[in-house]
Amino acid sequence: MDISIQKVMNQGTEQWLVCAGSIIVYFRDQQSALEFSSQLKERVEAPHLLPSAEHQVLVKEMQFESV
């Protein structure tokens, strides 16, 4: 997932946007935006385990889509 930070001016006020996919979150200061994006990146990149039954369904769906 691409996560980016942008500085924008809104009615003369500096704001910071964190963009993650189609989600945009506004922050009042750069430090808050950096902390949020760092935590989000850690969570996205963390290992995730699926329960075995759901994993099997997902694998079957992926195989079906690739045919």
Image (tube, rainbow, N blue to C red):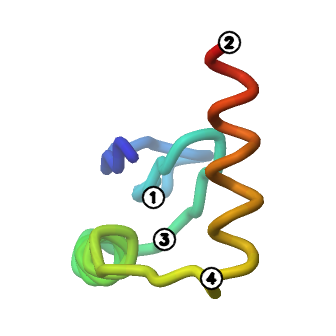
Q: Nearer the viewer, mark 2 or mark 3?
A: 2
Q: Dot 3, crowdedness within 10 Å: few (<14), some or many (≥20)?
A: some
The amino acid sitting under disc 2 is Val
Looking at the image, tell me whether mark 2 or mark 3 is earlier in sequence order.
3
The disc at residue 52 is: 4
The span from disc 3 to disc 1 (Cα, nearest Å) is: 6 Å
**Dot 4 lies on which element?**
helix
Q: Please determine whether, in this image, residue 54 is positioned above or below residue 13.
A: below
* Image point (64%, 32%), residue name: 63
Q: Which residue is mark 1?
A: 15
| Marks 2 and 4, the one that precedes in the sequence | 4
Q: Which of pointers 1 and 4 lies earlier in the amino acid sequence?
A: 1
Closer to the observer: label 1 or label 4? 4
Q: Which residue is mark 2?
A: 67
Q: CA distance from mark 2 to mark 3?
A: 44 Å
Mark on residue 27?
A: 3
Disc 3 and disc 1 in contact, CB within 8 angstroms: yes
- In this rendered view, identify the residue nearer to me: 5 or 40: 40
Lower position in the chain sequence, tag 3 or tag 4: 3
**Residue drawn at x 26%, y 79% as measured from the top left:** 42
Measured in 3D between alpha carbons, the distance from the residue under mark 1 to the one under mark 4, in whole angstroms, is 43 Å
* Residue 10, x across and y down, in percent: 57, 46
Q: Looking at the image, how many numbered discs can be counted on the residues?
A: 4
Instruction: Tell me, yes or no, whether the two marked residues, 1 and 2, touch with CB atoms within 8 Å.
Output: no
Q: Tag 3, which secondary structure?
A: strand
> Can you give x and y, in whole percent of width and height, for residue 35 in the image?
26, 83
Name the secondary structure under disc 2. loop
Distance between the alpha carbons at the discs numbered 1 and 2: 46 Å
